[in-house]
Amino acid sequence: GISGEYLGRFKANHGGIMAEKTAIVTGASRGIGCAIAKKLASMGALVIVNYNGSKEAAETVAGEICKEGGSAVTYGCDVSDEAAATAMIAAITKDYGGIDILVNNAGITRDNLMLRMTDAEFDAVLATNLKGAFHTMRAAAKTMLKKRYGRIINIASVSGITGNAGQANYAAAKAGMIGMTKSAARELAGRGITVNAVAPGFIETDMTRKLPEEIREGACKQIPLGRFGQPEDVAKAVAFLAAEGSYLTGQVLAVDGGMVM
Ligand code: NDP
């Protein structure tokens, strides 16, 4: 259920380009999702900080948002669990009168060379990264259709565009997410709902911190801007699509320091 703090949604001084908008960010307890949640909140949106295991971290994120004068609540749910993900969207719709912005950011890696990759590694990544986004999109689109307004932003990856050795599962999920984004964009465009993907390159988070040093150095050499991105770099692109993207749909925006062009 909904837990955590809920402050100041209708505070008179709480303006911003996204005031009165409700946004859910999946996997917002850490990394890129945390930066997206904070960015959307700073623009005035009420943000639902979804997490799976990291309850305390999610509550810290929501608490920090509220301390800065924003509005946030936490909601724990494994997005790969169909019933739980659907119930989460229904609860938010009921409690806050709908959902304006859905950011599918929850994701995991189980890297392995294809010859060694187990079915369990393949299935886990597909279940969270692709099917999880399907669960929340299907449920959220229903409530967005009623409002004839919505912004859906799926966090894909450049791996889904170029492929990546050791990531057959992850690249398949992210390429699938890009196809799903374009299909949903076509289905929902007539009702004021846009659906776009953001494809980050190498971003400094827990996910990339566990990469061996030689892989990190090799990656840097392929990035024209010469550095890993920060979670905030991705959050800015998401904020743009959410706030200013009224004539943008079905697109994949790479935020990768120029790695894929
Ligand atoms: P992190 O590992 O830092 O954080 C992952 C987040 O996803 C956590 O908040 C985690 O929550 C949440 N999560 C994982 N599984 C689930 C689940 N089943 N249900 C709900 N939430 C879940 O990852 P990043 O911030 O690096 O990545 C965020 C997104 O960006 C992912 O989709 C990733 O694939 C993508 N991306 C990242 C890149 C990078 O270089 N870092 C590059 C390209 C794409 P909890 O801790 O509570 O389990």
Image: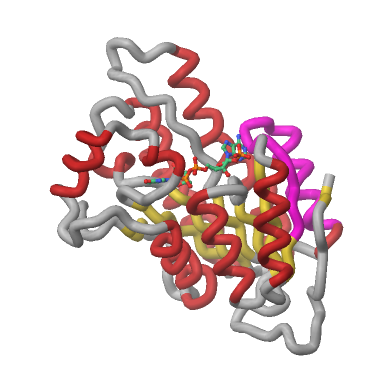
Q: Is residue 240 left or right of residue 261?
A: right
Q: Residue furthest front?
A: 213
Magenta stretch: residue 89 in it? yes
User: What residue lies at 43% left-to-right and 39% top-to-bottom?
Assistant: 207
Magenta stretch: residue 138 in it? no
Q: Which residues are magenta?
A: 73-94
- Residue 19 visible, this orientation: yes
Q: Quadrant of the N terminus?
A: top right
Answer with the quarter of the image where residue 152 lies.
bottom right
User: What residue lies at 71% left-to-right and 42% top-to-bottom?
Assistant: 55
Where does the image place residue 63, in percent across and percent down from the top left?
72, 61
Q: Nearer the viewer, residue 212 or 231?
A: 212
- Seen in the picture, residue 217 relative to 38 is either above or below; the reply is above
Answer with the quarter of the image where residue 54 lies.
top right
Q: Residue furthest bottom?
A: 13
Q: Is residue 204 left or right of residue 89?
A: left
Where does the image place residue 83, in percent across and percent down from the top left?
75, 33
Where does the image place residue 161, in percent across and percent down from the top left?
28, 44
